[in-house]
Amino acid sequence: MQNIEIFTNHYTPGKSYAEPTSEIIQKYKEIFPEFLMRLWQDDGFTHYGEGFLWTVNPEEFIEPLQWFLGDSEIGHAIIRTAFGGIIFHYRNNYHYLSPIS
């Protein structure tokens, strides 16, 4: 069983709230792992685990992350949690931004 099947079996996807465009997929396929691209293509932007994790359109989080990181820095959001946390890609690493810390 592949990692994506393990993930989606454990965290069942919900109804997609938006479909990623081909432009979004092309833009981020070199930045994000293939696993995430497959989730986007198979399920769209949606929630998993009854809303605990949400895949997001990174374009919607550019301004908030630029504010947090500084105007000249670019981070790319990939997941938000049910509690408002953001998991994002920045300088070849993944980080967690908590709304309460």
Image (cartoon, rainbow, N blue to C red):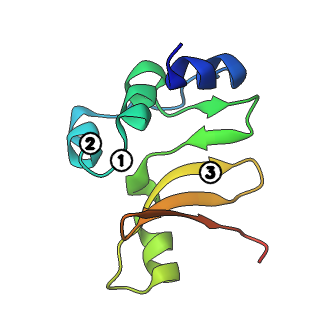
Callouts 2 and 1 close, C-beta under 8 Å: yes
* Mark 1, other Cα within 10 Å: few <14 / some 14–19 / many ≥20: some
Image quarter hosting the C terminus: bottom right
* Residue at the image position 64 percent from the left and 22 percent from the top: 14
The dot on residue 29 is 2
- The Cα–Cα distance between marks 1 and 3, rounded to whole angstroms, is 15 Å
Q: Amino acid at mark 2?
A: Lys
Q: Is residue 95 left or right of residue 72?
A: right
The dot on residue 32 is 1
Residue 67: x percent and y percent?
A: 48, 81
* Residue at the image position 66 percent from the left and 30 percent from the top: 48
Vertical comparison of 38 with 87: above or below? above
Residue 85: x percent and y percent?
A: 68, 60
* Mark 3, other Cα within 10 Å: few <14 / some 14–19 / many ≥20: many
Q: Is residue 81 left or right of residue 31?
A: right
* Res 1 → quadrant: top right
* Mark 2, other Cα within 10 Å: few <14 / some 14–19 / many ≥20: few
